[in-house]
Image (cartoon, helix red, strand yellow):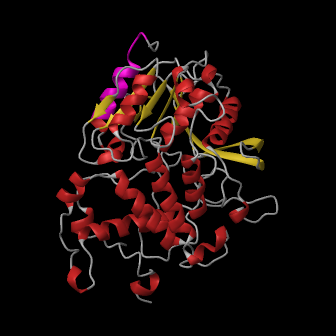
Amino acid sequence: MTNQNLHPAYLVGYPPLTPVTDAAPVGDYDTGYHPPLVHKPIPATGAWLPGDPPGERQFAHVGPMSLELGGFLPAITLAYETWGELNDEGTNAVLLCHALTGDSHATSKDGTDGWWHNIVGPGKAIDTDRWYVVCPNALGGCQGSTGPASAAPDGKPWGSRWPEITIRDMCDAEKRLADTLGITRWALIAGASFGGNRVMEWAASYPEMTGAIAVLVSAAATTAEQIAYAKTQIQAIALDPAFNGGDYYSQPDGCGPHRGLGLARELAHITYRCPTELDQRFGRTPQQGEDPLAGGRYAVSSYLDHHAYKLALRFDANSYIAISQSMITHDVGRGRGGTDVVVAALTMPALVVTVDTDRLFYPRDVEALADQLPGSGPAVYVKSDYGHDGFLIENDQVTKILRDFLDDPSLFTQ
């Protein structure tokens, strides 16, 4: 069987990698667990499922839960990972909230991999010799926590029956995880992008449990433009014929909704990066061995195809929709008197970080959030040529910013 038969024509950016698209020394990840990029058909779902290797995940059963919008989940499991030790007073717990397609694997026990392994660990910015760090996979995710690919009470995947969840529901589930772990108050809750949305919701829903917050490239409510981006990504998946209304889990490898999921990722990835990088890294260079004037691609097209392929190997289309929809409805002020009212009441110490080239969470909007939060100073800037993903790439700058915040004796005991 040829490679062409193994892969759909749409997702052509599979290995072997080319020097044009993938040799640049730039981290292209928002996950800790990376499936091997090998020649194989794309599975119907890239979700972690019981029986798969657990990696460093732990699992907590946090019970049944009524959802904000009226749904009900009879049993919820959260996958999570921890580093460091909870002190006797229970005052050193830190909650990390991952990005949209992230997972619980912020770092590994040996510190060599994970989506923030340069930031979290012994002696690092979030020092696990000092802090007890917890990172759960969000409710609705697909890397060990209960989500659409999980078994419903009848033993079959939830699929199209999965109820709509909100970021408020995710924080409810994480609060139950905190109770299970014996954590009554987080010293810090930190996250970026979708993770930062959860940080803001945590502060609004459980201010008594939120000692301080670090909000990177995020907001208290979703903007119209962000809603538009998420809507088009959801539509890309839903319009894939193989999506089958969300019931595709029984399909053989190569027959799932990977085209729609891949297109959603390509649309999203454009918002995660910026013109400076794309122009300097790719320009109008043709993909190696291809002629754009004869049906071939430019290098930047192959780059996007490659990211589509990588996500399809490790993510679930229904989870992508569920999480994207939760971002669409994100607003800490919903039912509480309005966003401005709620934000003005969040008096805990706050660190707000923006990336100067971000075109998903514009610096002006992040600055406005910092100005509104009573416990925050001015927004701190990360300078980057890589747009929104700067929070994952500019590790030296992020390290200094977090160290300055966490080492402030007026905010945190040493």
Out of 182 and 301, give the one closest to the viewer: 301
Q: Residue furthest right?
A: 154
Seen in the image, is 198 located left or right of residue 402?
right
The answer to whether residue 291 of the structure is visible from this angle is: no
Q: Residue at x 35, y 47 (%)?
A: 389
Pick out the residue farthest to the bottom. Answer: 1
Query: Residue 315, image x and y in percent?
Result: 53, 61
Specify the quadrant of the image occupied by residue 398: top left
Seen in the picture, residue 215 relative to 21 is either above or below; the reply is above
Does residue 274 appear left or right of residue 213 in this picture?
left
Q: Is residue 217 above or below residue 123?
A: below
For image coordinates 35% across by 27% down, the residue present is 379
Image x and y of residue 382, in percent? 29, 35
Q: Nearer the viewer, residue 113 or 388?
A: 388
* Residue drawn 23% across the image and 79% down it: 292
Query: In the displayed structure, would residue 317 be above or below residue 79?
Result: below
Q: Does the segment drawn in magenta span residue 398?
A: yes
Q: Which residues are magenta?
A: 397-410
| Quadrant in which residue 277 is drawn | bottom left
